[in-house]
Amino acid sequence: MSRAGTHEDAVLAARAGRYTEYAPSPALGAHFGCLWSHDIHEGADQRIAIVPDGYCDIVWMGGRLVVAGPDRSSAFPTLAGGERIVGARFAPGAAAEWLQVQLCDIVGQSIPLEGFWGAAALRLNELLGACANSDERLLQLRSSLEQEAAKHATSARDMASVFARASDISQSRDVVDAMLDDLSIGARQLRRRCHAHFGYGPKTLARIRRFQGMLGLCRSKSLPLAELAVAAGYADQAHMTRDVREISTLTPMQLQQQIAG
């Protein structure tokens, strides 16, 4: 996937088709935040921007199951028109146990699921490939994950707390200090656990979640950029512009225009 340079021609993933999230079943609620489908618009291939969100997903795309590791910066794949994608998003703190890997080892990577689950992933891929449509495929994915869930411990609750704290753009205190107070652990241990469960340290996680908070504000209201920066927890508009460019290669104004379009 292309990650360097400018990508003004790319469109946010949600604008490239119909993206829908579904609440996990009770059996999956402790392990997955949601299941989702993304039906890419028919027609020409589209270059899309997949922006970091702090999550790790299992994705069925192009006839193959992969693990999409957490990202530090946006990815810009070209997707075929009419592509039908389904996925399951791990709950914060759950992926490392399910995959038996530290997420810092798979940052920015898309890895075949059989690399983690072996023959079980190949069997699941065959089942998904035999489905008639996205709805049937999503039901099959949910059913298979429910069977698998019995083998796994629930997500690390302390890391769910860290993720929630990182996502709170309304707090005025230093986010890492707040995490340390929440968990009563040392800075080195917090950093080590964040690398294992999110792929990067707490400051990077907070930066990515603040970026996602800014996108959420753009979806819910139209604000001047200076007001958007304050509402999203940035020091000022210049701070927001610099951070957003580094994460997405797009400017806040370009993101606003895409979301409003």
Image (spheres, rainbow, N blue to C red):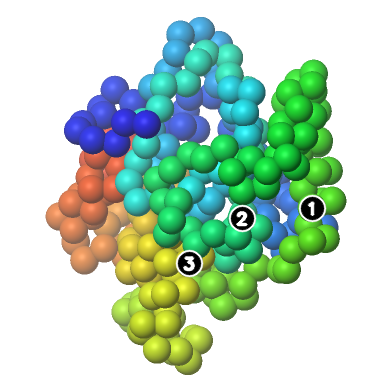
Estimate the x, y position of residue 33 in percent, counting from the top left: 65, 55
Element carrying mark 1: helix
Lower position in the chain sequence, tag 2 or tag 3 = 2
Lower position in the chain sequence, tag 3 or tag 1 = 1
Element carrying mark 2: helix
What is the distance, in whole Å, between disc 1 and disc 2 at their CAs?
Answer: 12 Å
Q: Which residue is mark 2?
A: 99
Left or right, 90 with reference to 253: right
Furthest residue to the front? 119
Q: Residue at x 68, y 43 (%)?
A: 118
Labelled disc at residue 170:
none
Left or right, 116 with reference to 2: right
As drawn, 57 above or below 79: below
Density class for disc 3 (Cα within 10 Å; few <14, some 14-19, many ≥20) is many
Estimate the x, y position of residue 253 in percent, counting from the top left: 25, 39
What is the distance, in whole Å, between disc 2 and disc 3 at their CAs?
Answer: 11 Å
Q: Which residue is mark 1?
A: 148
Q: Amino acid at mark 2?
A: Leu
Estimate the x, y position of residue 123 in percent, counting from the top left: 77, 34
Lower position in the chain sequence, tag 1 or tag 2 = 2
Left or right, 36 with reference to 242: right
Q: Amino acid at mark 1?
A: Glu
Q: Residue at x 45, y 89 (%)?
A: 185
Quadrant occupied by the N terminus: top left
Furthest residue to the left? 238
Q: Which residue is mark 3?
A: 196
Q: Which residue is more in the foreground, 147 or 22?
A: 147
Furthest residue to the bottom? 184
Element carrying mark 3: helix
Q: Amino acid at mark 3?
A: Ala
